[in-house]
Amino acid sequence: MNNNEKEALRWYLQGTRDARTAGRNSKNGDFEVACFLSQQAAERAVAYETVFRKSLDACRDLDVFYVPTRYPNGIPDGAPFEYFRLQHAEKAYRAFDEVHAVVRIDLDPLTENTDRT
C-alpha cells in the first residue's frame, strides 16, 4: 500500500465510523447531529476525484447539512435541534450510503490486512 492509499484509508475508516455514530444519533432523536455526521462521513470517505464525480448528486444532497445543522443562525428561526427531523437524518444517511458505496469499491480491499475496520 502506498502513502496515498494509506492516507485515503485513514479518512475512509474515520468516515465509516462517523456514519455509525450518525445512525446512533438518529435513533436517539438527535437528528441535526445525525445529518451533520452523515455529511462529514461522506466528506471523509471521498478519497479520489473520480469517485467524487460518480457521487456528485449525493454530495450535493449532503452539502446542505453542513452549516444549518450546527449553527442556530444557519436557519431562519429556532435552533437546529428544533428544525431537523428523522426524515432529514434518513435522507442524509442515504446520501452518505451512496457515496460510501462508490468509495468502498476502491478502499475496502485495503482494509483486508488491517484490524481497524
Image (cartoon, rainbow, N blue to C red):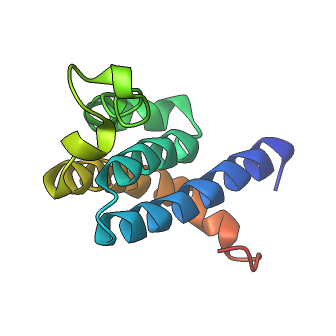
Mark yes or no: residue 99 visible: no
The furthest residue to the right: 3
Between residue 74 and residue 1, name the one nearer to us.
74
Q: Measuring 28% from the left and 48% from the top, which residue is drawn there?
A: 92
Q: Give residue 70's position: percent from left, percent from top.
A: 43, 35
Residue 27's spot in the image, x, y percent? 30, 72
Look at the image and tell me in which quarter the C terminus lies.
bottom right
The residue depicted at 20 percent of the width and 24 percent of the height is 77
The residue at the far bottom in this view is: 115
Residue drawn at the location 57% of the way across and 43% of the way down: 44
In the displayed structure, 48 sits above or below 17; it is above
* Quarter-of-image position of residue 3: top right
How many marks on residues?
0
Q: x and y percent of residue 112 in the render?
A: 68, 76
Q: Quadrant of the N terminus?
A: bottom right
| Res 90 → quadrant | bottom left
Q: Is residue 48 left or right of residue 97?
A: right
Q: Which of the 4 image quarters holds residue 4?
A: top right
Is residue 65 shown above or below 98? above
Q: Nearer the viewer, residue 99 or 16?
A: 16
Q: Is residue 9 visible?
A: yes
Identified at 18% across, 58% down, the residue is: 86
Q: Is residue 106 above or below residue 69?
A: below
